[in-house]
Image (cartoon, helix red, strand yellow):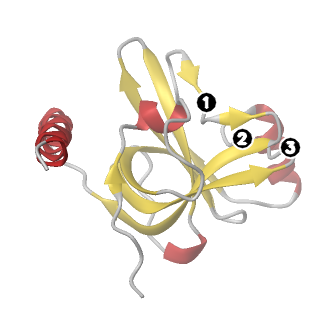
Amino acid sequence: MLPRPGVYYFPWEVSAGHVPDGGTLRTFGRLSLYDTVHSRATLTVQHGSEQHQVLVCTKLVEPFQAQVGALYVVLGELDQQKGDTPLLGHSRANRSCQRTGSLIFQAGLSSKTVGPAQSTDGTSVVKARVLTCVEGMNLPLLEQAIQEQRRYQQGRDGGS
């Protein structure tokens, strides 16, 4: 049986918790942090005055040549991590990684950051099946295409 196709979600929708746990999704963002030891990456995107983060588990797509600051599209399943999982990019996570000898690539984040969707018992992480560098892609055109696709599907589903 083939895996379900990914539905496009904007990163701010993922970080706001609009994706069901276990749901297959596609999203995008700039690689701002990559922790090679823990196979975790953080994608960020600016939307309005806020910068949103999406945590990505990269175990299934490694090894890959991480290009910090480059635009990536990820296809995978959303997984609710149980317990107090430290977020990448936070000083506590960086200190614990430094103690274990982790290699961390990080880009500077300058504006207000909104973290990934969190609940009282964990953090949402996208388990990547595909992680593709799409540097040079026209991001406003991608956002417009996602909105057009949603309008088409709503019209098709509503007309049945």
Which quarter of the figure has residue 39?
Answer: bottom right
> Visible in this render: residue 46?
yes
Q: Quadrant of the N terminus?
A: bottom left
Could you classify mark 3 by the number of other residues whose Cα lies within 10 Å: few (under 14), some (14-19), or many (20 or more)?
A: few
> What x and y, as percent, mark residue 4?
39, 70
- Determine the CA span between mark 3 and mark 2: 9 Å
The residue where tag 3 is placed is: 84
Q: Residue at x 18, y 35 (%)?
A: 147
Q: Position of residue 113 (x, y in %)?
A: 56, 22
Check if mark 1's residue and mark 2's residue have beta carbons within 8 Å: yes
Residue type highlighted by circle 2: Leu
Question: Which residue lies most toward the top here?
Answer: 49
User: Circle 2: is it few (<14), some (14-19), or many (20+) Cα within 10 Å?
Assistant: some
**Residue 101 left/right relative to 155:** right
Residue 125 x/y as whole percent: 61, 51
> Is 26 situated above or below 142?
below
The amino acid type found where label 3 is placed reads Asp
- Name the residue at 86% across, 48% down: 83
Query: In the structure shown, which secondary structural element does the residue marked by tag 1 occupy?
Result: loop
Q: Amino acid at mark 1?
A: Gly
Q: Residue at x 36, y 37 (%)?
A: 10
Q: Circle 1 sits on which residue?
A: 115
Query: Which residue is disc 2 drawn over?
Result: 87
> For the residue carrying disc 1, how many other residues have a C-alpha within 10 Å: few (<14), some (14-19), or many (20+)?
many
- How far apart, in angstroms, are the residues tagged by discs 3 and 1? 14 Å
